[in-house]
Amino acid sequence: MTLSAVGIALFSVIAYLSGDPARSRIPIDPEIATHYLSVVAHALPASLALLIGPFQFATPLRNSFPRVHRILGRVYMVSIVFATIAAVFATAFTLDGVPVQVGFTLLIAAWTYTLVQGYRTIRRGQVQLHRIWMIRNYSLTFAAVLLRAFLGLGLALQRSFPGLTFAEIYSSSVWASVLICVIVPEYFILQRSPAPRAAPRGRRENTRSTNAAAIPVRSR
């Protein structure tokens, strides 16, 4: 997972640092000059966040270098903020149709909400909740990796099914990556959450007795 995140991050950065719209990974509207700029402004900080994320979840690094963890966390948060703002403009200008716009809009909203919750919980000292919200947030960041994986698979299938259009493949890839990155982390969060254990019978009886004794008795 880390290798794929680092690979896609570097892959995106190299393409968009060239400043050549012809090397864009998505179709660019030539009539809107700011379309390419919004894509670049989204891709660069999003790639940085994608690159930082895996190391934030490494427990030995987090425990040994807590200051570095906090600094990288701030860089990650700022990167997501800039990436989401640029993504709003890039989504509005996209040439890939309404289904793609709706999918990316939902992704942007969830990306922003989980980041805000992650920030609020750590400010309150709720470390466990902070980790849960950041798992959700980074999973949405990781949608960039799955999007390219599904897109590559779809383009490979296009050779056997020539009727498939790029728009259909791209739209399906967007929605598949978003849905998987929403559902999968919830499964692992639920699996790792400690289930409440029932108290022993004797302890339950003592608790009931204590509660009964605590009930005030009215005098007549």
Image (tube, rainbow, N blue to C red):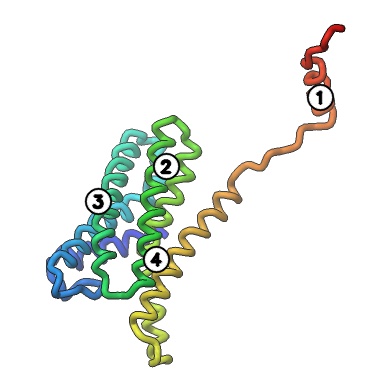
- Total marks in image: 4
| Mark 1 or mark 2: whose residue is earlier in sequence | 2
Which residue lies at the image location 18% right of the left edge and 65% below the top edge? Answer: 16
Mark 4 and mark 1: Cα distance apart in space: 52 Å
| Mark 3 or mark 1: whose residue is earlier in sequence | 3
Would you identify the image quadrant in which residue 38 lies? bottom left
Percent x, y for residue 41?
20, 58
Mark 2 and mark 4: Cα distance apart in space: 21 Å
Q: What amino acid is labelled 1 in the image?
A: Arg
In which quadrant will I find the C terminus?
top right
Measured along the vertical axis of the image, is residue 200 above or below residue 32?
Answer: above
Would you identify the image quadrant in which residue 163 lies? bottom left
Task: Give 168 or 97, whichever is nearer the viewer.
Answer: 97
Which residue lies at the image location 31% right of the left edge and 75% below the top edge? Answer: 96
* Mark 2, residue position: 117
* Mark 1, residue position: 208
For label 4, count other residues whose C-alpha is less than 10 Å away and answer few (under 14), some (14-19) or many (20+): some
Q: Secondary structure at mark 1?
A: helix
Side (left or right) of 143 relative to 28: right
Task: Give 210 or 43, whichever is nearer the viewer.
Answer: 210
Which residue lies at the image location 28% right of the left edge and 59% below the top edge? Answer: 88
| Mark 2 or mark 4: whose residue is earlier in sequence | 4
Q: What amino acid is labelled 4 in the image?
A: Gly
For label 2, count other residues whose C-alpha is less than 10 Å away and answer few (under 14), some (14-19) or many (20+): some
| Mark 4 or mark 1: whose residue is earlier in sequence | 4
Residue pushed farthest right? 220
In which quadrant will I find the N terminus?
bottom left
Viewer-nearest of discs 4 and 1: 4
* Mark 4, residue position: 103
Q: Secondary structure at mark 2?
A: helix
Mark 3 and mark 1: Cα distance apart in space: 55 Å
